[in-house]
Image: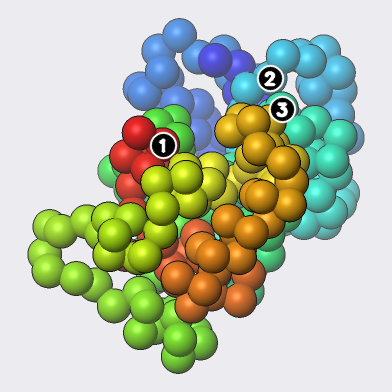
Amino acid sequence: MKVLVIDDHALVRDALRGVLKELRGEASVVEAPDWREATRQIEKTPDLDLVLLDLGLPDRDGFEILAELRERYPAISVVVLSGRNDRESVARALDLGALGFIPKSAQREVMLSAFNLIFSGGMYIPPEILAHQGPASMRSTSAPGPPGRRVSGADLGLTERQLEVLALLMQGKSNKAICRVLDLAEPTVKNHVSAILRALNATNRTEAVIAARALGVDPRRCAG
């Protein structure tokens, strides 16, 4: 695994390197304090697997960087790290294709759990965001069920194929990427996504992912 950590604080980069090495001892970790250096590192390491992106870089807006990374390097997974973890920032980052949003204030154990989830195909969303869903429809949809119980496709009224599409949505995949993975036509995928949004009372893909995560939907089990 090859990882690029983009953050302007050396202590944060060191901490992230330690977490990554603890989880993936074989990981090759390179660092950049700003976007200018990050572009050089990306050119030098074209087979990067993961970028950890700080939104508060000194030389460019973090959301602009995230959008550019998803457009120019769709094969590279991106996880956002930020000192701010308000719902708007989290939702925007997920909308732009981030596979997770980890607050810098998170304890080391939380970061370890977050990366474990991401490495196993899930999407990490801060628990405080899940606890404050926003729209009333989402709050009712995302109410937790019995302790330790995970919802099934039958609970949500979704077919097995729609659960597979939901799993890929939770991995940050675009409709076109889902088409390739599942060998489906794009109109078919759009129909499945629409059914998922209705089932979760969500108005967009990000709300659907947040609602699914709050309900305990496991993307690994969905993908079967």
Q: Is 19 located above or below residue 69 in the figure?
A: above
Viewport quadrant of the C terminus: top left
Residue 131 placed where, x, y %?
36, 75
Question: According to the image, label 2 marks what residue?
Answer: 48
Q: Is 12 located above or below residue 95 in the figure?
A: above
Question: According to the image, label 1 marks what residue?
Answer: 223
Viewport quadrant of the N terminus: top right
Q: Would residue 87 be visible to someone looking at this image?
A: yes
Q: Determine contact: label 3, label 2, CB under 8 Å.
A: no
- The amino acid at mark 3 is Ala
Look at 45% across and 70% down and name the residue there: 199
- The amino acid at mark 1 is Ala
Mark 3 or mark 1: which is in front? 1
- The amino acid at mark 2 is Leu
Asked which quadrant contains residue 205, the reply is: bottom right
Left or right for 61, reference 152: right
Question: According to the image, label 3 marks what residue?
Answer: 75
User: Mark 1 or mark 2, which is nearer the start of the sequence?
Assistant: 2
